[in-house]
Image (spheres, helix red, strand yellow):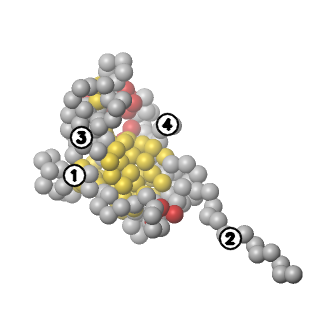
Amino acid sequence: MAAPKPPATTPSQTVGPFYALPGGILWDGGQEAVAAEHPGAFVLHGRLTDGNGDPIPDGVVEIWQADERGRFDHPDDPRPESSSWQGFGRCPTDADGGFWFRTVKPGPLPTPDGATEAPHLDVTVLARGMLNRVVTRVYFPDEEQANAADPVLSAVDAARRGTLVAAADDRGYRFDIRIQGDGETVFFAV
């Protein structure tokens, strides 16, 4: 009688890097929410790093956002003029932890209590060794007044708010994400 075969090896229970396999969550052109010729299109780029500042070469960064008018294509958006624009992108990081997206600046968003959120992009990060995704936001440096009034950004410790504001540069906007350690990006429990 032959000895039973051991069970097949299974991946550890982390959120990555299995998304790169065929049939995974990535698709060609996933980082282009809009075409280059779309009015107002810009590139958001950055680097995903760990607590030591080393690049995370096999992560995934995902964005979702409202359109230029602050509208979502979602049944929970109660405004009658909802958008047909998806406002979603997904980009694998490269060997240096780099990622990029082509998108547009969203409009301000109403809150349930009648306040307004500053234009921002919502961001999810998936990477090897993480048991859960992390979620953050990207705010724009040229929206100082809106940023100062934003209820979410205002709730963040003033010394850490800078980790949520992109920097304008020659490519568009730069937003680096540090998973932990000194200068860790602020992440939100959702």
Residue position marked by numbered label 4 in the rendering: 190
Residue located 29% across and 36% down the image: 72
Residue located 36% across and 21% down the image: 112
Q: How many marks?
A: 4
Crowd tier of the residue under label 1, counting other residues whose Cα lies within 10 Å: few below 14, some 14–19, many 20 or above: many
Compared to residue 46, the image places residue 121 above or below, namely above
Q: Amino acid at mark 4?
A: Val
> Marks 1/2: CA distance?
42 Å
Compared to residue 54, the image places residue 121 above or below, namely above
> Marks 1/3: CA distance?
13 Å
Q: Is residue 91 visible?
A: yes
Residue located 17% across and 56% down the image: 36
> Marks 3/2: CA distance?
44 Å
Residue position marked by numbered label 1 in the rendering: 34
Residue 121 % position (x, y): 32, 42
Which label lies toward us, 4 or 2? 2
The quadrant the N terminus occupies is bottom right
> Marks 1/4: CA distance?
27 Å
> Marks 3/4: CA distance?
25 Å
Pointer 1 or 3: first along the chain: 1
Which label lies toward us, 3 or 4? 3
Residue position marked by numbered label 2 in the rendering: 8
Q: Amino acid at mark 2?
A: Ala
43 relative position to 13: left or right: left
Residue position marked by numbered label 3 in the rendering: 84
The answer to whether the residue labelled 1 contacts the one labelled 3, judged by CB atoms less than 8 Å apart, is no
Q: Residue furthest front?
A: 1
